[in-house]
Amino acid sequence: MNLRKVRIQLTMLFGLMAAIAVAAISWFAINQGQQGILDSAEREAEQVVKDLAIAQISGEMDENRFPNTWSVAITDEWRDATPIGDTSVEPPLFSFVEDAWDRPEFHEFEQNGPWLAYSEPTSEERWVVSVIDLFDYEQDVAGLRWRIVMAAIGSTLLTGTLGHWLAGRSLRPARLAMAQQRDFIADAAHELRTPLAVIQASAGHTLSRERGGEEYREALSEILTATTRAGAKTSSSTSWTMVLVSMRACCRLSLTDSVAATAWGRAVWAWRSPRGSSKPTTPPSPPPTTTDAAHW
């Protein structure tokens, strides 16, 4: 198992989930912030109309306090739009008033930039229209959006780094287990090198020429001694399986003889394991070979 690849995959998964969550939160924050800024522009336009009404009632009119504000009158016979203060824009006042008519209403329009118009009826035939420049508000929205996006990117990178660290910490037991497994395999291979060399030498010497059954039996006894010595050094049954497989590969046993040799190896292993006082005093004898020299 490639733990480095698994760690990268876990980091990417954690980063993707964090990015989705951060993107959703950022989208919500941008919408709420933008709406709040635009609501403040609407409140400013409403406040202009309220201040104008208070000034008219108190008789303290100051035209400089009410830029881009008009008094609009519409009757069946004539229409009039009188600016109350200085104006820097020419909005479609009559269209706004006719659209709103007997209720306050906001209208956004473009004229060398974004503008917000607020119309409110003051009598049956008169309305007050206040226009607010939205340029500064749009700048605030852009700044807010930029800050949130940068914070989202930073949060995603931070959570990705944290995910990488957490993935490495979570995989630490697996890494330790794999290291122990590699050490075990290396130790087993080192301990089995000498017995396997003995097995290979005995098998090679036996197969170098035609021999009788007793000589084959002596060769198998040498192999038994080597496997017993290997079993004394290794406590894993896996090592015995490796010995038996190597013995079959070296001696080129037939299928019948390999089965018998495997059973013999298991019997030797059972003899080696302490099972009480009933254990035989001598190891089991090697199985008789049924193959001739041609099979060897």
Image (cartoon, rainbow, N blue to C red):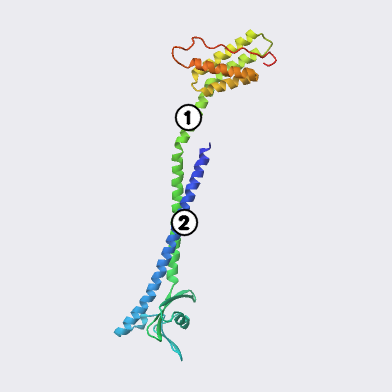
The image quarter containing residue 189 is top right
Crowd around label 2: few <14 · some 14–19 · many ≥20 (10 Å): some
Alpha-carbon neighbours of circle 1 within 10 Å: few (<14), some, or many (≥20)? few
- Amino acid beneath label 2: Ala
Q: Which quadrant is home to the C terminus?
A: top right
What type is the residue that disc 1 sits on? Gln
State whether residue 84 is above or below residue 156. Answer: below
Nearest to N terminus: mark 2 or mark 1: 2
Residue 128 x/y as whole percent: 40, 82
Q: Position of residue 7 (x, y in %)?
A: 49, 42
Q: Nearer the viewer, residue 218 or 7?
A: 218
- Residue at 40%, 73% in the rendered image: 42
Q: Is residue 106 visible?
A: yes
Between 83 and 285, which is closer to the camera in this rendering? 285
Residue found 53% across the figure and 15% down from its top: 268
The location of residue 120, given as percent across then percent down, is 39, 80
Q: Quadrant of residue 115?
A: bottom left
Give the Cα separation between the discs numbered 2 and 1. Answer: 42 Å
Q: Residue at x 63, y 15 (%)?
A: 203
Q: Kindly identify the residue that appears in the image at 46 percent across and 51 percent down.
A: 18
Residue 292 position, x and y percent, is 68, 13
Tell which residue pokes out farthest to the bottom in this image: 77
On screen, residue 211 versus residue 86, left or right, reads: right
Which residue position is annotated with label 2? 23
Mark 2: secondary structure: helix
Residue matched to label 1:
180
* Callout 1 secondary element: helix
